[in-house]
Image (cartoon, grey):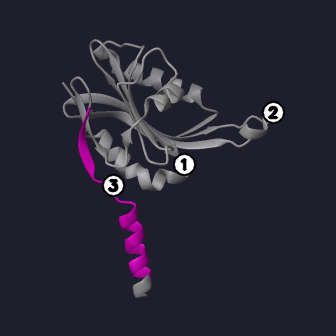
Amino acid sequence: MKKIILLCSVLLLGFSPAKLIKTKIGDGITMSLPSTLIPMATDDIVNRYPSVRAPLGAFTNVDRDSDFSVNISATQWPDADIELAAKFFKSGIYNLYDRVDIISEGIQTVNKKKFIFYEFESRVNGNKMKETERQAIFRYAYVQYYIGKDRTLVFTFSCPKDRKPEWQETTRAMMKTIKIK
């Protein structure tokens, strides 16, 4: 019986949120990130974010399979349209994947700013025509949007679905530390 209690304690402690460290993401944007996330190398940013606009910040873990980034969206919305923007962004998420299972969603206030958020699991079907791409890809993600007067910021965390238990609480905690000036 003592061994079972000890094992349960170890398992529960093993999935507790990681210690978060205050990190400057860009001008006027700070938040707390786990020390296990390190800034991405330039080559990783170029390969993972092929865009004319580089992310404001991009971080990955040592295994390079769990990523966090902050981007400026090309889409801008007036502050009064946050509910309409939420529907638009949700539709965009559904268009990116073959299957989406929403875990939680809504509008939340973080440090006196309103954010739209989506926490979900996704599936991208494999390509049966290509030998190396036949397997479906399953991911866990938490995406949070801030709609400002002059820009829309997108905060995204993503990891393999099987790593969700170790990242979910940490991700939820870090998304509640965002400060925008």
Residue marked by disc 3 = 17
- In the rendered view, tell whether residue 33 sits above or below residue 85: below
Residue marked by disc 1 = 161
**102 or 163, nearer to the observer:** 163
Secondary structure at badge 2 equals loop
- Residue shown at the point (40%, 20%) measured from the top left: 85
Residue marked by disc 2 = 129
Q: CA distance from mark 1 to mark 2?
A: 24 Å
Q: CA distance from mark 1 to mark 3?
A: 17 Å
Where does residue 140 sit, x and y in percent of width and height? 50, 44
Secondary structure at badge 3 equals loop
63 drawn magenta: no
Mark 1 or mark 3: name the one nearer the start of the chain: 3
Mark 1 or mark 2: name the one nearer the start of the chain: 2
Kind of residue at badge 1: Lys
- Residue shown at the point (78%, 34%) measured from the top left: 130
**Nearest to viewer (mark 3 / mark 2):** 2
